[in-house]
């Protein structure tokens, strides 16, 4: 099963539809890409203990010592590898000495073990890259064993490919030259290694001492090992070159040509696909020999299934092996090739990531679609916070105005926000009574605390010389206001609902023991016919300043359908856990009709939708949340009409009110009285 380790928290990346454009473009689900980026960031921060930025970037996935960039081509088949690579680079940020690495060439110029040739210094750097990788990977294996599966996926991709397995067992890279030694050393933990393929390879194995790699505490320690290995390889390469020179003089043909060296790297055709990306059949569990990426479990015996060095690779296999080696080299240099992301897509993903958007599966059993094989549930988009970046990105266009297109509407809405602020300021002065503790003193009692002023009367036979003080205070209150942002709420219904919500939030901001959350229910358009329920938490006084309302609420607009119960379910845990056990909790709903939502093969309407919505409301009540539901423009309902019965059924007859849009503002006053009395 692909990505068994990440599927539980990120889901399946093999989506057929781009949730924004509707195009068949696997991996272009921006909400999921943003969730992925946020999740990978959390993993990196947990492992490293540092707040290291992780972002989608251009062509490469690398670290500069301060941040990490990953590929935008995150799909099901490569996601675990992407996580592993990000963790690997994050370990570099935590553990590697980038000052040393950046000045390495200067350091090596002064080291007697390295000759004057620049190529030698770069070879030491390549060896150091490998040793340093083993050092930092050992750290993860030791300190965060739960992340081993992601490293396994990464090493399966870069080091345990079939082409590498076959290359290790073949006649390739068995001549003492630099290319052969680097290939054999980099793949020395592969179960198909042959430590007798080259002179000195066992000596290199001993110097690496991968079973005790934790002895290397710093990058400087890794450099010392790299220099020792360089000395060994250089000695055998120089000896082979000297021997080869003597033989070539003896075997020189009449034209003066010499035989080639079979151990040289063969230039591959870069346009041909690499079969080596398929994981090796011999790769085992993290505890097994083939996968033991910190080297602690690996041993130096030869592969037992095939006699090493007894078969040749064909031309295609040689090209594939060459590409696999190039891939390993790029990995060692921190330049693993990854797909880039356009500025347009990057802006969308960053905006969604900043908004904390995620997908929540809801509506199990609530699909009334006629097709028996229709979807059993649907994903609801939960936007944790509203910010200017989300507004400017124009992603959630069913609930937010585009600043460039709807300037006049935005200005009119700003006037309503100001009205709400003014009304809330007046209500807040009354609501401030919640900040005060009321104390009443009762004296001339026969029990309690002695009233010092009555002590003198004890000599005259008085017995009622005690007093008691009764102090009353208001419980902290948490209020969640959920507003229907469907298209039918347009006009006065929407304007006055906004005024009321803003007024309540303003009044609460003037107290010290009342928190207010305001959310909006709408849809997220993926195509003209395919949508997702959406709930946006636009304001949370526990996190946001009131200025957020005055600056951003003008962009909110009605424009979707009414996925009421689906949205309630998506944030039910947030509603039911507001405050603490001593807090008074309220859920207030503003809407103007029955729940309805339709997208593809998922239909949410009628009795099924009513029943599902009622179930969510009942769960709130069971958790101790007081539910108040207001049917905006309720005069449109007949006294005993079906609409009223449906509304009463969902929210409870004693928890509903039917008000005209002109009564929405006075409604805030009744709520104020409720809070004061609570």
Image (tube, helix red, strand yellow):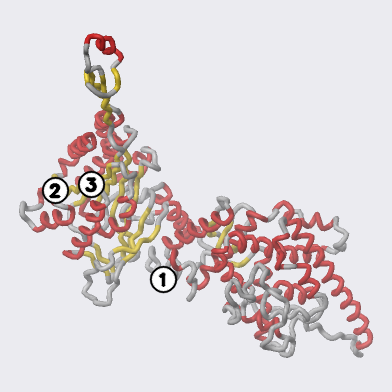
| Residue pictured at 38% horizontal, 65% vertical | 19
Please state the horizontal and vertical placement of residue 274, each as a whole percent of the image: 60, 79
Mark 1 residue crowding within 10 angstroms, few (<14) / some (14–19) / many (20+): some
Quarter occupied by residue 235: bottom right
Please state the horizontal and vertical placement of residue 397, each as a whole percent of the image: 34, 55
Q: Closer to the camera, 416 or 366?
A: 366
Tag of residue 129:
none
| Residue pictured at 70% horizontal, 53% vertical | 97
Name the secondary structure under disc 2. Answer: helix
Instruction: Give the mark toward the camera: 1 or 2.
Output: 2
Mark 3 lies on residue: 626
Instruction: State the CA–CA distance, disc 3 to disc 2.
Output: 11 Å
User: Which is nearer the N-term, disc 1 or disc 2?
Assistant: 1
User: Which is nearer the N-term, disc 3 or disc 2?
Assistant: 3
| Residue pictured at 92% horizontal, 90% vertical | 254
Name the secondary structure under disc 1. Answer: loop
In this picture, is 337 found above or below 93? below
Mark 1 lies on residue: 15
Instruction: State the CA–CA distance, disc 1 to disc 3.
Output: 40 Å
Instruction: State the CA–CA distance, disc 1 to disc 2.
Output: 45 Å
Please state the horizontal and vertical placement of residue 98, each as a whole percent of the image: 70, 53
In this rendering, does residue 321 appear at all? yes
Mark 2 lies on residue: 654
């Amino acid at each position: 099963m692909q990505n068994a380790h990440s599927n539980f928290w990120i889901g399946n990346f093999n989506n057929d539809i781009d949730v924004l454009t509707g195009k068949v473009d696997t991996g272009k689900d921006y909400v999921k890409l943003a969730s992925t980026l946020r999740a990978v960031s959390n993993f990196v921060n947990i492992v490293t203990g540092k707040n290291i930025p992780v972002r989608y970037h251009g062509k490469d996935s690398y670290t500069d010592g301060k941040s990490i960039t990953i590929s935008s081509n995150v799909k099901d088949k490569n996601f675990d590898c992407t996580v592993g690579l990000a963790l690997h680079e994050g370990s570099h940020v935590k553990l590697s000495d980038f000052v040393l690495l950046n000045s390495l060439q200067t350091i090596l110029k002064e080291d007697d073990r390295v000759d004057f040739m620049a190529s030698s210094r770069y070879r030491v750097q390549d060896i150091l890259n490998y040793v340093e990788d083993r050092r930092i990977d050992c750290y993860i294996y030791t300190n965060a064993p739960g992340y081993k599966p992601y490293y396994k996926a990464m090493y399966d991709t870069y080091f345990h490919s079939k082409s590498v397995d076959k290359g290790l067992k073949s006649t390739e890279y068995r001549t003492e030259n630099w290319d052969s030694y680097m290939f054999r050393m980099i793949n020395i933990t592969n179960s198909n290694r042959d430590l007798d393929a080259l002179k000195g390879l066992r000596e290199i194995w001993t110097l690496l001492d991968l079973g005790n790699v934790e002895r290397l505490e710093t990058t400087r320690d890794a450099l010392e090992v790299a220099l020792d290995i360089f000395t060994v390889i250089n000695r055998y390469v120089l000896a082979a070159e000297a021997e080869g020179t003597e033989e070539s003089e003896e075997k020189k043909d009449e034209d003066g040509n010499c035989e080639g060296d079979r151990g040289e790297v063969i230039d591959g055709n870069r346009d041909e696909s690499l079969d080596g990306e398929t994981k090796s059949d011999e790769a085992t569990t993290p505890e097994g020999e083939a996968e033991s990426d910190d080297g602690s479990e690996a041993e130096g015996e030869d592969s037992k299934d095939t006699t090493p060095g007894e078969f040749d690779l064909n031309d295609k296999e040689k090209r594939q092996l060459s590409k696999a080696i190039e891939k390993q080299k790029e990995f060692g240099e921190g330049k693993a090739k990854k797909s880039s992301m356009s500025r347009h897509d990057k802006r969308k993903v960053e905006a969604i990531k900043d908004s904390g958007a995620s997908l929540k599966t809801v509506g199990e059993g609530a699909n009334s679609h006629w097709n028996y094989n229709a979807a059993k549930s649907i994903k609801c988009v939960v936007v944790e916070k509203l910010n200017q970046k989300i507004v400017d990105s124009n992603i959630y266009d069913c609930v937010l105005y585009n600043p460039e297109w709807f300037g006049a509407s935005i200005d009119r809405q700003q006037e309503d926000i100001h009205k709400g602020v003014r009304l809330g300021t007046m209500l807040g002065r009354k609501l401030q009574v919640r900040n005060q503790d009321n104390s009443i003193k009762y004296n001339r009692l026969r029990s309690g605390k002695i009233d010092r002023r009555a002590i003198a009367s004890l000599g005259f036979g008085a017995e009622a010389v005690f007093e008691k003080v009764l102090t009353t205070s208001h419980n902290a209150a948490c209020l969640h206001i959920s507003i229907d942002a469907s298209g039918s709420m347009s006009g006065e219904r929407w304007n006055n609902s906004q005024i009321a919500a803003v007024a309540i939030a303003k009044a609460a901001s003037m107290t010290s023991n009342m928190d207010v959350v305001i959310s909006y229910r709408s849809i997220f358009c993926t195509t003209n016919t395919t949508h997702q329920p959406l709930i946006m938490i636009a304001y949370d006084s526990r996190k946001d300043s009131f200025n957020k309302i005055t600056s951003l609420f003008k962009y909110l607009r009605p424009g979707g359908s009414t996925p009421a119960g689906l949205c309630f379910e998506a944030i039910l845990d947030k509603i039911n856990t507001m405050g603490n056990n001593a807090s008074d909790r309220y859920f207030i709903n503003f809407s103007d009709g029955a729940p309805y939502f339709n997208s593809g093969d998922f239909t949410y309407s009628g009795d099924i939708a009513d029943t599902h919505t009622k179930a969510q409301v009942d769960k709130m009540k069971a958790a101790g949340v007081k539910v108040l539901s207001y049917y905006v423009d309720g005069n449109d309902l007949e006294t005993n009409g079906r609409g009223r019965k449906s509304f009463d059924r969902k929210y409870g007859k004693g928890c509903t009110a039917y008000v005209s849009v002109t009564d929405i503002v006075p409604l805030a006053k009744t709520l104020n009285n409720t809070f004061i009395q609570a």
